[in-house]
């Protein structure tokens, strides 16, 4: 397969199932942000995360490709790119509950940081929330399955819990927000 096609030299890109849109189209912004999140998760995984966390992040990276395929497809039902299901969202909730059960209860907002792995996961959480906003924006003009938004919402929550869990495993406490005044 050839890497360059020259078809996007005019600032457009092809969608799965046909059609072309500008590279700044809301659909491209949405799945481009999903791709960015996936790359950031790849960096987070290079920080030597413990096995349970690393394994589930590998699974999430594959699911993000599924979500990207869905968002790259204007007619999801016809093209069969509705890969993520309610069971995938339920699995995210199970992971949230599993990892959160071992963490101290929060009584204040916390700052991103601690270990390198946790800091990267906090950054991933922020990228995930931006992706969620972009998918909401896309949904204002085009059809987006509710499951895509639910998945991103839960994933953002999971990334927050995982960042805290990575710090806890390294015996690094959460960094509480201290009001300036």
Image (cartoon, rainbow, N blue to C red):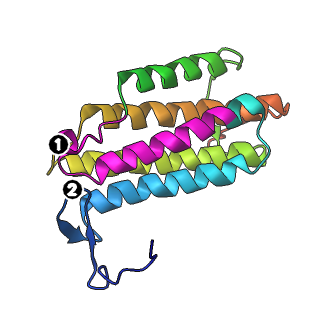
User: Pointer 1: residues within 10 angstroms few (<14), some, or many (20+)?
Assistant: few
Which residue shows up at 65% across the image and 21% down it? 99
Toward the left, the furthest residue is: 141
Could you say where residue 44 lies in the image, as x and y percent from the top left?
68, 49
Query: How would you rate the neighbour count of disc 2 (Cα within 10 Å): few for under 14, some for 14-19, many for 20 or more?
Result: few
Please tell me whether residue 83 is drawn above or below residue 127 in the rendered image.
Answer: above
Q: Which residue is mark 1?
A: 78
Location of the N terminus (image quadrant): bottom left
Q: Which of the labelled discs sits on residue 17, or is there none?
A: 2
Residues shaded magenta: 55-83
Task: Give the number of marks.
Answer: 2
Q: Quadrant of the C terminus?
A: top right
173 up-or-down from 28: above or below: above
Q: Are marks 1 and 2 in contact (CB under 8 Å)?
A: yes
Which secondary structure dominates the residues rendered in magenta? helix
Which image quadrant is residue 78 in? top left
Return the x and y of residue 127 as percentages of the image width and height: 49, 51
Q: CA distance from mark 1 to mark 2?
A: 9 Å
Q: Is residue 181 visible?
A: no
Residue 157 in picture, x, y percent from top left: 51, 31
Observer-nearest of 26 and 6: 6
- Helix, strand or loop for disc 2: loop
Tell whether 123 sits left or right of 28: right
Q: Is residue 60 magenta?
A: yes
């Amino acid at each position: 397969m050839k890497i360059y096609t020259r078809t996007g030299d005019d600032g457009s890109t092809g969608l799965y199932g046909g059609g072309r849109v500008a590279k700044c189209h809301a659909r491209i912004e949405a799945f481009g942000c999903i791709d960015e999140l996936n790359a950031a998760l790849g960096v987070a995984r290079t920080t030597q995360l413990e096995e349970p966390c690393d394994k589930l992040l590998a699974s999430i990276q594959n699911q993000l490709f599924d979500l990207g395929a869905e968002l790259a497809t204007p007619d999801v039902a016809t093209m069969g790119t509705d890969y993520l299901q309610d069971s995938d969202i339920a699995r995210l909730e199970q992971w949230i509950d599993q990892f959160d059960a071992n963490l101290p209860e929060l009584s204040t907002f916390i700052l991103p940081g601690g270990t390198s792995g946790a800091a990267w996961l906090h950054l991933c959480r922020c990228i995930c929330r931006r992706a969620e906003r972009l998918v909401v924006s896309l949904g204002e003009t085009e059809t987006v399955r509710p499951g895509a938004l639910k998945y991103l919402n839960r994933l953002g929550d999971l990334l927050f819990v995982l960042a805290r869990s990575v710090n806890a495993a390294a015996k690094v406490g959460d960094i509480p927000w201290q009001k300036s005044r």
